[in-house]
Image: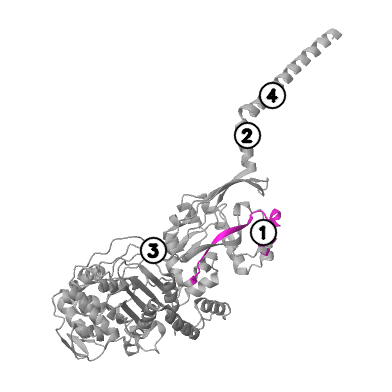
């Protein structure tokens, strides 16, 4: 091969290589131009998304206030720490470091480890709330070595009256996975520190209380650490919820129930406003909102007084003799003369069965039968008019009914009749069933709110509806019964307290204000002569009930008190009603009496609960705590 041929071959190869390089350069330049010009906006956005993040700002929850604007549920600023599962690189190391800094106990660590696998992505797992500033700062300075740990300053729910409003208001808590899915994967629910209503008014009124979240655009590093805040759209706080409750009265009623298991409900006779709805014992919603531990939960679950149950709405009781005013109204509406007498010889015989009375009362008309609580009179008249008549009257007075209230649940109870028994038990109604129902026993079971409403409707003569949210409304329509019949029943209830009745010891301490009422003793089960004695096991003792209204001449307030296993209405329930009404007419006198009682009980609600919690924590394995109601 000559030198010329070699030169030509080299030149061709160099030319081809040069053309290839030039083509590649054009392609690279074109691509770079396309990215820099045509795709400029897209890549700018991607870069911004790495550097700029938009974070939700949880809205401040709306306050819940009483009828006078006094706070029942408010917000306060706290320090807290959460774990964000998807950002954790070393869960065990992070938990160990937090345990060292914060001194977490074994139960808290176990809870965190159990919740982490169940958490949804960025759903926060709470570590601890109500941190001191020193602990908060100690964690903040170590954030570079603790990815997934989120210390923050947040607003926490606070309930000034604690357990006194537990069942009424409910509590808030961290959203669960089910909450997140049910609410359309709302990202607000994954925001650290955000809580939703879990029970009571907090849950039912969640939409209005929640508010609208704000948004903050922030600059972060590649590791997600905040560099600076760019722009902020502030949150919009939730709406204030105005309730019909009198916060002072609610607190007093809860405290006055003491260590007993029971409830106290009071309504405004004209408007139907629920002024107090106390159920004790109860949980402290502050503890639930902060995150209750398993030990506290076990303590309440094993308490035979059932502090987790709202006794006002969800507990059902035989009303006993508190049912008699409703039967008396039915007797009068059936055309029976109120002066007609029935001779009480200590009971009533039906076939070969004896139905007992509380005593040998002699001749009884309607007025004296209510005052002395004569079973024989109501056996006789109940059988004469029949179950259908007094069952219908009971329902018109609010018994066994469902109310349109913002509550999570309510138990309706039973006002039985022949159709009900056939449907429920596939048995025919009997005359014995009528006699039992006429004195509030047998199949009759009701909740305390229904009893309070019965007293309200008898006191006012109107079709009053219970209300829990404050609003303007028209006066209730009159009930379609004769005014003289209401007056006859009210007169008998007046005699119960202010005459020769069963609750004379509970007269109000005012010469010009009288309370009318009706006591009741309800069997828990038939266990013979030992049933009502103080020596019987607590759970076998009779319930004590009392329905009432005041003042007698111009009723303004009406309500009901139920004391579980209190042995009798005159003994356990009527004194509570007396003190609650005294609070409305003379607060200083009522508070002085309450403070004296609380000294004997060992302090106020919070002090007694703290002492019980400490005793539970220090108990021996398998040991149970004594029932303080005994």
Task: Using the image, determine if residue 7 lies above or below residue 196.
Answer: above
Location of residue 178 in the rendering, given as x and y in whole percent from the top left corner:
48, 56
Q: Please give left or right for residue 302 compared with residue 5 in the image.
A: left
Residue farthest along the front direction in this orientation: 512
- What's the CA distance linking mark 3 and mark 4? 69 Å
Range of residues picked out in magenta: 134-162
Q: CA distance from mark 1 to mark 2?
A: 35 Å
Say which element carries label 1: helix
The answer for how far apart the CA atoms under marks 1 and 3 are is 41 Å
Q: Which residue is mark 4?
A: 29
- Depth check: 480 or 539 in front? 480
Return the residue at label 1: 94
Q: Residue at x 50, y 54 (%)?
A: 237
Q: Are marks 4 and 2 in contact (CB under 8 Å)?
A: no
The kind of secondary structure element at disc 4 is helix
The residue wearing badge 2 is 43
Q: Is any atom of residue 257 visible in this view? A: no
């Amino acid at each position: 091969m000559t030198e010329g041929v070699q030169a030509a071959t080299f030149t061709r190869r160099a030319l081809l290589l040069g053309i290839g390089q030039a083509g590649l350069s054009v392609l690279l330049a074109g691509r770079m131009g396309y990215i820099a010009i045509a795709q400029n906006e897209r890549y700018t956005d991607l870069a911004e998304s790495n550097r700029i993040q938009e974070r939700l700002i949880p809205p401040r929850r709306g306050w819940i206030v009483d009828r006078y604007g006094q706070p029942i549920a408010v917000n306060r600023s706290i320090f807290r720490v959460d774990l964000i599962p998807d950002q954790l690189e070393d869960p065990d190391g992070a938990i160990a470091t937090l345990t060292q800094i914060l001194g977490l106990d074994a139960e808290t660590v176990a809870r965190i480890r159990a919740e982490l696998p169940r958490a949804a992505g960025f759903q926060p797992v709470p570590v601890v709330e109500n941190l001191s500033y020193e602990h908060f700062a100690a964690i903040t300075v170590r954030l570079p070595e603790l990815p997934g740990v989120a210390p923050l300053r947040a607003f926490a729910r606070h309930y000034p009256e604690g357990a006194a409003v537990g069942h009424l208001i409910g509590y808030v808590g961290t959203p669960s996975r089910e909450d997140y899915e049910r609410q359309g994967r709302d990202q607000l629910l994954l925001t650290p520190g955000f809580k939703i209503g879990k029970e009571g008014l907090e849950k039912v009124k969640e939409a209005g209380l929640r508010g609208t979240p704000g948004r903050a655009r922030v600059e972060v590093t590649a590791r997600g650490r905040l560099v600076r805040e760019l722009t902020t759209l502030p949150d919009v706080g939730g709406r204030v919820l105005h309730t019909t409750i009198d916060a002072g009265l609610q607190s007093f009623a809860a405290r006055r129930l003491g260590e007993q298991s029971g409830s106290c409900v009071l309504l405004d006779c004209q408007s139907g406003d629920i002024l107090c709805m106390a159920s004790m014992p109860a949980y402290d919603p502050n503890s639930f909102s902060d995150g209750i531990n398993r030990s506290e939960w076990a303590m309440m679950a094993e308490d035979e007084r059932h502090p987790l149950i709202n006794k006002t709405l969800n507990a059902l009781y035989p009303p006993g003799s508190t049912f008699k005013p409703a039967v008396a109204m039915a007797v009068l509406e059936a055309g029976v003369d109120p002066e007609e007498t029935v001779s009480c010889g200590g009971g009533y015989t039906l076939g070969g069965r004896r139905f007992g009375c509380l005593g040998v009362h002699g001749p009884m008309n309607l007025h004296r039968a209510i005052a002395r609580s004569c079973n024989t009179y109501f056996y006789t008249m109940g059988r004469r008019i029949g179950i259908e008549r007094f069952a219908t009257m009971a329902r018109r007075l609010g018994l066994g009914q469902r109310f349109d209230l913002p509550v999570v649940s309510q138990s309706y109870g039973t006002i039985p009749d022949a159709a009900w028994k056939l449907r429920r038990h596939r048995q025919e109604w009997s005359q014995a069933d009528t006699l039992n129902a006429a004195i509030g026993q047998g199949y009759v079971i009701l909740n305390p709110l229904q009893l309070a409403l019965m007293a309200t409707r008898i006191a006012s003569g109107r079709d009053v509806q219970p209300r829990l949210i404050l609003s303007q409304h028209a006066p209730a329509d009159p009930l379609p019964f004769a005014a003289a019949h209401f007056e006859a029943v009210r007169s008998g209830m007046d005699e119960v307290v202010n005459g020769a009745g069963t609750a004379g010891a509970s007269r109000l301490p005012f010469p010009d204000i009288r309370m009318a009422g009706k006591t009741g003793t309800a069997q828990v089960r038939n266990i013979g002569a030992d049933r009502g004695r103080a020596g019987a096991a607590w759970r076998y003792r009779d319930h004590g009930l009392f329905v009432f209204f005041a003042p007698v001449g111009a009723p303004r307030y009406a309500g009901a008190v139920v004391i579980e296993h209190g042995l009798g209405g005159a003994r356990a329930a009527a004194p509570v009603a007396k003190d609650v009404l005294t609070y409305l007419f003379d607060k200083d006198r009522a508070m002085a009496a309450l403070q004296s009682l609380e000294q004997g009980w060992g302090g106020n609600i919070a002090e007694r609960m703290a002492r019980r919690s400490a005793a539970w924590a220090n108990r021996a394995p398998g040991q149970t705590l004594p029932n303080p109601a005994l």
